[in-house]
């Protein structure tokens, strides 16, 4: 419930910032794009889900939000990837 209320707050603040002309970060840009495609409640639920996954990843990797985790750095350094054909 708290994540949903936080998501609603983020959507409202992002809409206000956009009307004033301030730039938005990647998460807020994604959230406003979802809100443009669907209604406000679905966008808030999707953003709450995304914030929960971000919270889990920051706790799992013990890294601050916005900094690449060691497991992401290993993925970016790969030379080959497995692809299903």
Image: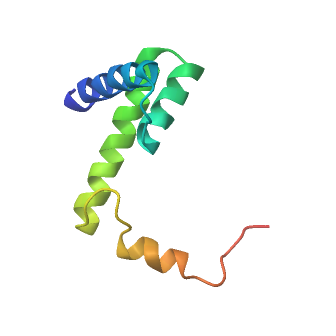
Q: Position of residue 43 (x, y in %)?
A: 45, 24
Which residue sits at x=36%, y=76%? 70
| Residue with the most extreme left position | 2
| Residue with the most extreme bottom position | 79
Q: Nearer the viewer, residue 43 or 13?
A: 13
Q: Quadrant of residue 62?
A: bottom left
Q: Position of residue 26 (x, y in %)?
A: 46, 44
| Residue with the most extreme right position | 85
Which residue sits at x=66%, y=82%? 80
Where does the N terminus fall, quadrant-wise? top left
Q: How is the image coloured?
A: rainbow
Badge count: 0
In the figure, 7 relative to 73: above or below?
above
In the figure, 26 relative to 70: above or below?
above
Where does the C terminus fall, quadrant-wise? bottom right
Q: Position of residue 68 (x, y in %)?
A: 38, 67
Q: Nearer the viewer, residue 38 or 19?
A: 19
Q: Nearer the viewer, residue 49 or 28?
A: 28
In the figure, 48 relative to 25: above or below?
above
Which residue sits at x=32%, y=28%? 10
Q: Position of residue 21 (x, y in %)?
A: 45, 25
């Amino acid at each position: 419930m708290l994540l949903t209320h936080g998501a609603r707050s983020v959507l409202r603040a992002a809409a206000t910032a956009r009307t004033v002309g301030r730039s938005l970060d990647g998460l807020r840009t994604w959230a406003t794009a979802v809100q443009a495609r669907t209604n406000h409640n679905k966008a808030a639920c999707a953003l709450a889900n995304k914030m929960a996954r971000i919270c889990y990843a920051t706790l799992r990797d013990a890294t601050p939000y916005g900094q690449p985790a060691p497991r992401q750095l290993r993925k970016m350094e790969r030379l080959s990837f497995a692809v299903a054909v």
